[in-house]
Amino acid sequence: MGCGSSAGAVIEQNRAPGFKGPVFMTIKHALLERDVRFIGVMDPYIKLIMGRQEFKTPIAKEGGKHPKWEGCTHTFQKLLGEPDVIIGQVWCENTLTSDILIGEGAFSLTSIRKGNAEPKRISFLLFHNGEKAGEISLEATFTLDPSGKDLPEIKAPDTEGKFIVKPKFGRLKKNTNLLLKMDPFLTIHFGNETMNTSVDAAGHTTPKWNDEIIFTRETNEDTLYIEVWAESLIGWNDFLGCGYASITDSLSLKENQLQTVTIFYDGSNVGEVEIEFSFKTAKPQDYLQKDKQSTEAPTKESFQQQLQQYQQPQQQQQQQQQQQQVLPQQLNQFVQNFEARYQNNYGQQPMNGRVDFTYPNGDFYSGDMMNNLKHGQGRLQFSYGGYYEGQWANDQYNGMGVLVIGDSKYEGQFINGKKNGQGKQVWNNRQQYDGQWVDNNMHGNGEWTFVNGGKKKGVWANGNRLRWLDDDQNIISSNKTMVSGFMLTSPNQQFTLSFFHDGRLFIFHNQTRQPIFSAINFNRQPIPPVWLKFDQSGGELQMIDAKGMPYWVTGQNFGNFAPPFVLILQDDGRLVIQDANGQPKWYSH
């Protein structure tokens, strides 16, 4: 397909009315941070994908990290039943082998969904394996089919509010762990916020989640960037792919809008994730204003429905008792007096001091205020469930507090509305991180608690674990019982011993992530839960299961040894039991 051509084919289903129409784009340029050409200058091109439609720009010969496309245009057809997300991939032409993906990103039609005469300039970020790789700049114009002008998602205003994300399950094609089942989790970016789901231990290629993640939406934010990772107990987590989702459908305020998000890895489809989305507006009055282009007066039924959605419970009861005719002009009066209906117990808008206050979106605040801002100590109960209780400054979380959202609970320090400092986050009452935070991300030293109760200290950066830190480092010098999930790391950080939930023990090379030793041949099948037990006086390492009996023990070496013994993971990757004189009693291999 050449530059300037049009995807004009419209499938049969799109004869029905709905959110559809042509999207006309002018591709401008890209700013790339990732250089995939070791010799010479890159020859980039852009591939745009919308549903089943694709378009490829001409190759910008020797465009390098700043390629431009002059006069390059294309038209997509937004079809019914397809997401309003356009994915952009930047590739480098490679004449010797296959082309190389530099990075990919996406934008949605949310901001132009109503149809606009003037092109809108759009820039969106590119990522590669979870790292920023650059950005694409283009202009886009969407012409809405007239049949869709009255759709809820089209008529909905662009307002601020809370965007609620509930990941459900995934169907993954990529498997990074050939020996064991993967432990997948999601990292979700929206605006300047990044949050993780819980880890589905052994979820493998069909993970399930039960998290509820809440983002604060500004009016210029409309696209989620979703990464799929597999937790690794040895070094870096494994990147499985990424996908994109739009907020458009959720702006209609319908609860639990289900989207299927396609997951890509190096430009290829590697699975999908099912996610539910809901949006709670911070400005419900915007939804009550009449369409300026419509002269049709609201009906009694539509007015009552809108009115009841935002009324306080006692007002709803009064409304149900009234059987009088509701006149259309009452809607205007209701909108004008909207803020006045949400007053404190003294019948005034709160200004200073201790207040009890219900916001238009249903949130309830009880606490200190200063100049109409939450300031001091207080509790904010969210209308969608959950709460924040603690210290405030200038209407934001500041100081010590507790934030409960869905199945997650954070207790610790906040700065300017974000988790900053020391804090503990618990997911599903099982997994938890206790450590340092920067801008809502785990960043610094912390301790991770696994699903089975095992604990491990590590170092995190921007929400990703860099490495594990073990109190014992590479040596156990006393009697100790270790639960599954236990690890040892060699002094040179090259090797890691991992004891898994199914009772198997491996020693991995951290760089290749390949096992160099395994204890998997047992005298009987272990029954979880399992433990490792090191006997300091006898110099023996045992694997014990739920029966309380060993199903694997270290080999016996005969000789004269001087207890106490120690268990050491050496720099060569071998596990050794030594006596008090440093004489080895047993080697793993």
Image (spheres, rainbow, N blue to C red):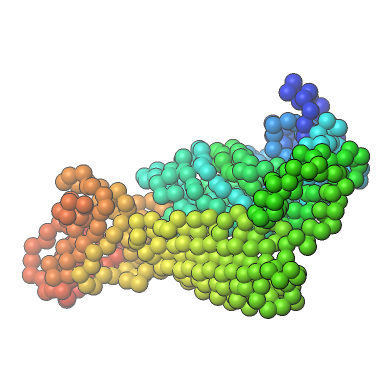
Q: Nearer the viewer, residue 151 or 228?
A: 151
Q: Nearer the viewer, residue 149 or 453?
A: 149
Residue 493 visible in the displayed image: no
Q: Quadrant of residue 82?
A: top right
Identify the residue at image location x=74%, y=48%.
Answer: 307
Left/right of residue 317 with respect to residue 498 in the rendered view: right
Query: Could you tell me residue 51's position as x and y percent?
Result: 69, 34
Query: Could you tell me residue 198's position as x and y percent?
Result: 48, 54
In which quadrant will I find the C terminus? bottom left
Left/right of residue 377 with respect to residue 207 in the rendered view: right
Q: Quadrant of residue 388?
A: bottom right
Q: Residue furthest top?
A: 12
From the viewer's perspective, is residue 191 above or below residue 563?
above
Identify the residue at image location x=21%, y=62%.
Answer: 533
Q: Nearer the viewer, residue 265 or 354?
A: 354
Query: Could you tell me residue 65's position as x and y percent?
Result: 74, 55
User: In this figure, what is the number of numbered marks?
Assistant: 0
Left/right of residue 576 with respect to residue 152 in the rendered view: left
From the viewer's perspective, is residue 434 above or below residue 134?
below
Identify the residue at image location x=29%, y=59%.
Answer: 483
Identify the residue at image location x=77%, y=34%.
Answer: 19
In which quadrant will I find the N terminus? top right
Query: Could you tell me residue 394's position as x and y percent?
Result: 70, 75
Q: Quadrant of residue 196?
A: bottom right
Residue 211 visible in the displayed image: yes
